[in-house]
Amino acid sequence: MVALLALAGCGAVNSPGADKKPVESDDKSPLAEYMGEGFSNGGGMMRITRAVGGGGSDEEQLAKQRKLEDSVAACMKAAGFEYVAVPPESNPKSKFDEAFNLPPDKFAEQYGYGISTIDWGKPAGEDESDPNAKIRKALSPNAQKAYDKALNGELAGKGGVVQAVPADGKRPALKDMGCRGKAGEEVFGKGDDKMDDFSKFESLFKDLEALRKRVDSDQRVVDATSAWSDCMADAGHSGLKKIDDPRNQISAELDELTGTKKPQKGGPSVVIGAPSLDKVDAAKLADLRKKEIELAKTDQGCKAKTYDAPYKQASTEHEKEFVTQHKAELEQYRDTMAER
């Protein structure tokens, strides 16, 4: 369970691929000490990513994962199904993790922006040695559906479910969370309670948004953005004026292929998850993926040539000033997140 705050002013995002970035090799931002490892500031966007229930040491987290697996097994047994509690140490690394540990240029070469090139609606890969996959596979089709419903509740069979969050930010609670959802609440607490931690710092986040705007309006960044736009045009990609335009362009084309509708004004503000790409026209998807990779490689090259250094210089200066002015609030935020 992950809470994401994208301080970008660029509207809703429709796929996790739009929210993730390859690891950066540059020095950490001055704000990273307070906002956590999930904080990134690059490409004209600030992102704060926090795992719900993510506090504590690695060993504490492993202990919680073991407890969660035991709870799921007990719940499934009560529902009449077999489920083997799998020790977290035996779980294979996600292919998503491997992808996003690539340097930005290598990521662009293989995945573009990770929007159409990775099917976020599917699991990151199922380990053939997973005992529960074997248990499920041995069931009849109807029994598999019942098994999935007991395990995942209302999300069973929906893959990368797309769920709209109302404008007030209060997502309707699932009536049936399944054994996994119930176990998650038992071990990590309710997601809404964890999100309350963020609401306490609404003023801080508003100030961070104002900071982002100050960085974007810095003349060095304005000039760098113009140079980047010219570089993209010279490479055959004209009409791109904002640094996130290429990503948004690919995202919009994927929306068209999948039939995903953007939220209307006054309606839902965020879309979580991503539809599976199984039913998308394969030829059109292949063309879009090729386009995405080519566009991302060009984008990466133009940023490296014209944008990254000026942006880094400007953002670092503004962030240092922000830290000086908001040190007490930032320390409180850091300490509150560490205690979760």
Image (cartoon, grey):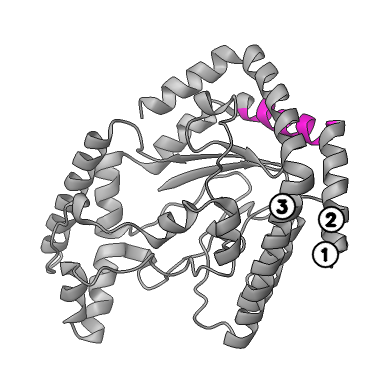
CA gap between label 3 and label 1 equals: 38 Å
Q: Secondary structure at mark 1?
A: loop
Q: Which residues are magenta?
A: 205-218
- Classify mark 3: helix, strand or loop: loop
> Residue drawn 69% across and 45% down?
43
- Residue 266's label in the rendered image is 3
* Residue 162: x %, y % from top left: 52, 64
Residue for badge 1: 235
Q: Secondary structure at mark 2?
A: helix
Between 255 and 302, the residue placed more toward the observer is: 302
Observer-nearest residue: 294 or 115? 294
Q: Earlier in the sequence, mark 3 or mark 2?
A: 2
Give the amino acid at mark 1.
Ala
Numbered disc in front, either 3 or 1: 1
Q: Nearer the viewer, mark 3 or mark 2?
A: 2
Q: CA distance from mark 3 to mark 2?
A: 37 Å
